[in-house]
Image (cartoon, coloured by chain):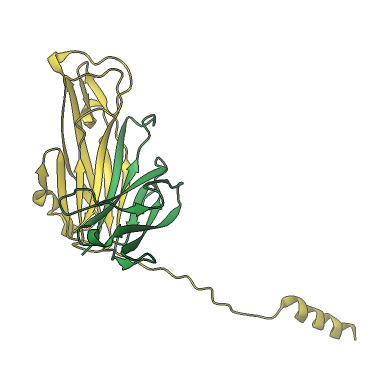
Chain colours: A yellow, B green
Amino acid sequence: MNSVKIVAAMCLLSGGAYAVDVPIEGTVQSRCTIDTDTPGVYGNPNAYTLTTAAADGGVMPITRFDVTLADAYYAKVTHPDSFSAAPTANATVTFTGSTEVSSVGDAAMSGYEAAKTTFGNSTQFDLTESGSVWLKTTSVATNGGDKAFPSGTYRSIVVAECIAK
Amino acid sequence: MGASAHEMTPTYPEWTPSHVNGVWKTTMEMFNKRKDVEWYEIGVFDKEWEPVNFVTSYRIFSMPHLSRVKFDVYVAAPDVGKAEYICSKSKLRLLSEQKTMIASRICSRFK
């Protein structure tokens, strides 16, 4: 009699062997994602130059563009033409810069660098393939007359845009 | 997607009539995975990148890290044909500790 009770109790406690499906749903929409991979830092190789070049102690800002639909977006990166923050306003600073492909997620994107267009401070890439591309930007600020930059923190802004075609 | 990303969908939004006569609307969705950005600004532009009048709940709005926001954008019927792009742009804090910052802007297009 006791063994019957034990078996009955075990059946009640175990709840039986159920298999329940837990669905996971997802939709992949056409989209562009801008990922600020590396923010960038100015190096100071001499008193009158600030540069993001690695050889001069800087860090180049790197932006990653992910697109899920081929031939739907342009990536446009604009290097700075002024400081967003600096110890003193200085009109004699000259800004130069450029943007180039740092790496690509697909061999079919290997032509992006050669096909890029540049206008003013902006460089535009035609994202003809789906996937990821990493773009790195150089920014150089030179103080006029080889005068030393006053000590303090200098900031500037790189604008990364993803524009639907 | 990376650890610090800005995303807006759809790529090609469409205008639909709103509940107000003579006003059209479209619905956009954003996802903020940028830890360094909390505020975004919306803009509507024509094909020459000139601003087009529009109405939305907040032109500049707060999006905490990892949050997803859906928002409606309204334009008057005469501006429906003019509106070419709808863009979201990150707003950067001047006092951020990062010395060089990246502002991100994503523009969807009306076709």
- Whether B72 is drawn above or below A51: the answer is below
Residue at the (40%, 54%) spot, across then down? B31
> As drawn, which residue projects farthest toward the right?
A1
Residue at the (34%, 44%) spot, across then down? B90
The part of the image, by quadrant, that contains residue B71 is: bottom left
Q: Position of residue A110 (x, y in %)?
A: 15, 54
- Whether A106 is drawn above or below A123: the answer is below
| Number of on-image labels | 0
Taking the image as shown, residue B76 lies to the left or right of residue A107, namely right
- Whether B68 is drawn above or below A27: the answer is above
Q: Position of residue A85 (x, y in %)?
A: 31, 26
Q: Nearer the viewer, residue B16 or A10?
A: B16
- Whether A49 is drawn above or below B14: the answer is above
**Which of the image's four quarters has the N terminus of chain B?**
bottom left
**Which of the image's four quarters has the C terminus of chain B?**
bottom left
Taking the image as shown, residue A113 lies to the left or right of residue A159, namely left
Q: Where is residue A47 in the image (x, y as percent from the top left)?
A: 22, 15
Q: Nearer the viewer, residue B101 or A21?
A: B101
Taking the image as shown, residue A133 lies to the left or right of residue B95, namely left
Residue at the (20%, 50%) spot, across then down? A75
Q: Nearer the viewer, residue A27 or B73?
A: B73
Q: Position of residue A82 (x, y in %)?
A: 22, 28
> As drawn, which residue projects farthest toward the front?
B21
